[in-house]
Amino acid sequence: MKRIVFALVGVGALAGAIATTAPVSGQSDGEAAPIYGIKLPRGYRDWRLISVKQLTGAGGLKQLRAQLSNDIAITAFREGKLPFPDGAIIAALHWNEVSSDADNKVLANGFPGAGLESSFAGTAMNVQFMVKDSKKYAASGGWGYADFTNGKPGNEALHEKCFPCHQPAKDHDYVFTHYAPTP
Amino acid sequence: MKRIVFALVGVGALAGAIATTAPVSGQSDGEAAPIYGIKLPRGYRDWRLISVKQLTGAGGLKQLRAQLSNDIAITAFREGKLPFPDGAIIAALHWNEVSSDADNKVLANGFPGAGLESSFAGTAMNVQFMVKDSKKYAASGGWGYADFTNGKPGNEALHEKCFPCHQPAKDHDYVFTHYAPTP
């Protein structure tokens, strides 16, 4: 039952993606996601950390998530610059959240009585991108959207949901994630 | 009651830290943490992402955490190289975990029936470091430890707990965190 969101965002990878636009620069080889034509950006695993999230849902769904961004986007986040400049890319990396009895035993021994339990990023789920190009993606608020599971893009029906779902964040240039303060 | 771990790791900042060794290179100005003499490393907010964690505890404690590392450490993580080479530094950034009714409403609208709820990194709590120097820190498995809250190091009693608490991870060079697979 932990696969609900995986199913929501991932099964379409087999449904035949249609790239309607050419890939933007800085993207790796591979299949382009439908509608926006985005391929996996190069080197996103090394990008800067914006923030961290947890997603829970019905059936015991638990995910840990990290939002990373390229240099253009992270600068805009830090300067509070809106709208984001062209070239900004935001990546959302999603993992199944798992726990370890061994880790929790260490916490119980180290901090007795505090009831501490830890969980961490387990298996990889999917990765999503927002790519800013105000001309190319003018019809969707200046952003292109893409979702990949195991390097394969999700289907067109999935990608049709991206922009409408981001509408409530219009005042923040359609970006829900805020920059986490530095501890 | 959400301040339990903050208290555990943070109140000692007022207790008078004693730096017994000189700071290692690449560290910013400021007060050194006790025992290991580590100052806040420069630029750690820009380091590479290792993994993401959640910590829960008694009294409603909920934290989201990110583990970042410098280039030396991330290379070792990716290559599975143990022990970590000298110069490796691991940072653990801790935030209060909070949620937003507005975000959850968006999820409910976008994915009806999935019961999705999201939470994210709120206020900054503290940041902890492991600094590898096999000679300097030979007595503690080659690692120096440091904890900072608002840029101020925790006290000596806190730092005395670090190495014993990491003993169970001896087979992984005292590091609990594992590299999260790339989605």
Image: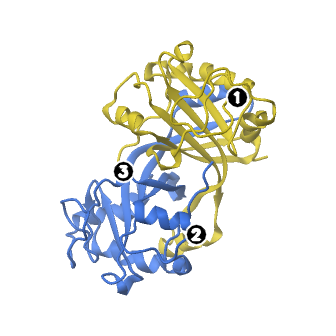
Chain colours: A blue, B yellow
- Give the secondary structure at mark 2: helix
Residue located at (54% from left, 27% from top): A102
Labels 1 & 3 near each other (Cβ < 8 A): no
Q: Badge 1 is on which residue? A: A111
Residue located at (51% from left, 46% from top): B43
Residue placed most toward the observer, A9 or B78: B78
Chain hosting mark 3: A
Residue B11's disc is: none
Do discs 2 and 1 share a chain? no
Please determine whether, in this image, residue A136 is positioned above or below residue B167: below
Residue placed most toward the observer, A124 or A8: A124
Spot the residue most to the bottom: A139
Q: Where is residue A59 in the image (x, y as percent from the top left)?
A: 50, 55
Labels 2 & 1 near each other (Cβ < 8 A): no
Please determine whether, in this image, residue A88 is positioned above or below residue B89: below
* Disc 1 residue type (three-letter): Phe
Q: Position of residue B40 (x, y in %)?
A: 60, 38
- Give the secondary structure at mark 3: helix
Spot the residue most to the right: B15
Residue B103's disc is: 2
- Who comes first in sequence, dot 1 or dot 3? 3
